[in-house]
Amino acid sequence: EIVMTQSPATLSVSPGERATLSCRASQTIGNNLAWYQQIPGQAPRLLISGASTRATGIPARFSGSGSGTEFTLTISSLQSEDFALYYCQQYNNWLTWTFGQGTKVEIK
Amino acid sequence: EVQLVQSGAEVRKPGESLKISCKGSGYSFTNYWIGWVRQMPGKGLEWLGIIYPRDSDTRYNPSFQGQVTISADRSINTAYLQWSSLKSSDTAMYYCARLVVVAAGFFDLWGRGTQVTVAS
């Protein structure tokens, strides 16, 4: 099983600042990585697929990068609605999807 | 509107059975796999299994094989997740999600979740 490790577990950021979230895969996955946002009490929402392609309707302040085993989600200027949980998911092989344990972005 | 609408919260006792649902609308339901994802209290996301509503081809996460049953009724654009004998450890939020099969697939559309509580 490919283990996805996200860091940090919690990120304290002030509104308007940049947030950088990391996700590491235990083995190489190419660019087969997705990022999801989960606001408490709501369903997850797809932000990024293919490591860097924003989903429909996702603001340009969200960007993804990386390949192989190291990935980053950057939120360039945090808005109030961005304080949430963020999960990465690898989809390198059929029926073996795994998620990271999540990073909570909280207001500093 | 493209959406997945899940059935409401459920409370059951250990040993009871349960079937929850996920109805798709606004897109061709039979052209996409539907997955079920579990989120236990305060925890992350785990996929339980997927189903292709066109022919009910079903695949399970080995960790959940035999623990749950996934089915679908394409005539009403609905997928189901069921338990024959619930345990307290089944207490969780359950999401259905549409799988986009690019490479091995990611989930691009999610339902709002069904809270399942199992307590005596």
Image: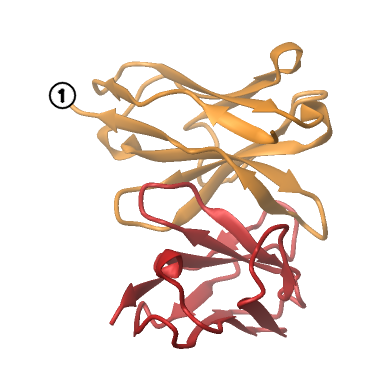
**The C terminus of chain A, quarter of image:** bottom left
Residue A37 in the image: state x and y as whole percent: 51, 61
Q: Is residue A16 visible to the viewer in this orientation of the structure?
A: yes
In the image, what residue occupies the spot 61% across and 33% down? B4
Residue B42 in which image quadrant: bottom left
Q: Is residue B33 left or right of residue A84?
A: right
In the image, what residue occupies the spot 31% across and 76% down? A107
Q: Residue furthest left?
A: B120
Disc 1 residue type (three-letter): Ser
Q: Chain of mark 1?
A: B
According to the image, label 1 marks what residue? B120
In the image, what residue occupies the spot 40% across and 69% down? A80
What color does chain B have in the rendering? orange
Tell me if mark 1 has few (under 14), some (14-19) or many (20+) residues whose alpha carbon lies within 10 angstroms of its own: few
Q: Residue furthest top?
A: B75
Residue B85 in which image quadrant: top left
Residue A62 higher or lower than B29, as above or below: below
**The N terminus of chain A, quarter of image:** bottom right
What color does chain A have in the rendering? red
Q: Is residue B59 visible to the viewer in this orientation of the structure?
A: no
